[in-house]
Image: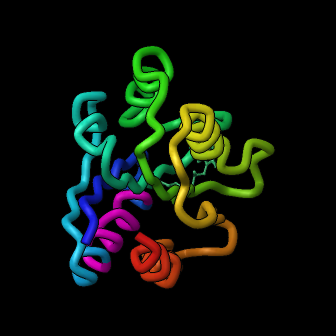
Amino acid sequence: MAKIGIFVGTVYGNALAVAEEALQILTQQGHQVEIFEDATLEQWQEYLQDVILVVTSTTGNGDLPDGIEPLYTDLNDKLGYQPDLRYGMIVLGDSSYDTFCGGGRAFDELLQEQGAKRIGDMLLIDAIDVTEPEIFAQDWIEGWGTLL
Ligand SMILES: Cc1cc2nc3c(=O)[nH]c(=O)nc-3n(C[C@H](O)[C@H](O)[C@H](O)COP(=O)(O)O)c2cc1C
């Protein structure tokens, strides 16, 4: 059983729906799970020895939603190295944008630079193909939960 913080960035609620699905699946697997929106660096730091699942969409021109961008900036400016963190990444975007899933990809790059260990591949969810992202993500979440 792992302690998992799900950190969400959403504009219209799709990423939150995926996060809520993940909460349900991972809790059923026996993990201890909590969702954070508009999260602070302090909340992130509570998981540095545990597991984080980032679920974020992309807005603007490859940007992170307002609810998670300050966390990204704080991680970049203040945290530095986080080698004991294990994490997963689910990114929502739309492939009609040149910056497909740009916000989440940037978040993943930052965590890699800071020594965090990603569990599994990133799940990219393309709004062009997928109308129900929370259903689409189910198999990935189940598989990810068993890797922890
Ligand atoms: C104004 C606007 C800008 C967007 N910009 C991007 C973008 O730069 N790259 C991308 O991959 N998707 C982009 N998207 C698509 C969203 O990321 C996608 O629709 C996603 O499913 C929204 O999830 P949310 O409801 O959690 O915000 C944009 C959508 C809108 C409405």
Q: Is residue 44 left or right of residue 64?
A: left
Residue in view at x 29 percent, y 58 percent: 4
- Magenta residues, as a range? 15-25
Q: What secondary structure characterizes most of the magenta part? A: helix
Residue in view at x 28 percent, y 53 percent: 5
The image quadrant that residue 108 belongs to is top right
What is the x, y in percent for residue 113?
A: 62, 33
The colour scheme used to paint the residues is rainbow
Tell me, yes or no, if residue 132 can be seen here. no
Tell me, yes or no, if residue 138 can be seen here. yes
What is the x, y in percent for residue 114?
A: 54, 32
What is the x, y in percent for residue 54?
A: 44, 51
Numbered marks: total? 0
User: Viewer-proximal residue, 21 or 27?
Assistant: 27
Q: Identify the residue at the far top of this view.
A: 77
Where, quadrant-wise, is the N terminus in this rendering? bottom left
The image quadrant that residue 146 belongs to is bottom left
Q: Is residue 140 above or below residue 68?
A: below
User: Viewer-proximal residue, 84 or 20?
Assistant: 84
Is 18 one of the magenta-colored residues?
Answer: yes
What is the x, y in percent for residue 32?
A: 19, 66
Where, quadrant-wise, is the C terminus in this rendering? bottom left
Residue in view at x 80 percent, y 44 percent: 98
Q: Is residue 96 left or right of residue 92?
A: right
Is 21 one of the magenta-colored residues?
Answer: yes
User: Viewer-proximal residue, 73 or 111?
Assistant: 111
Residue in view at x 74 percent, y 57 percent: 95
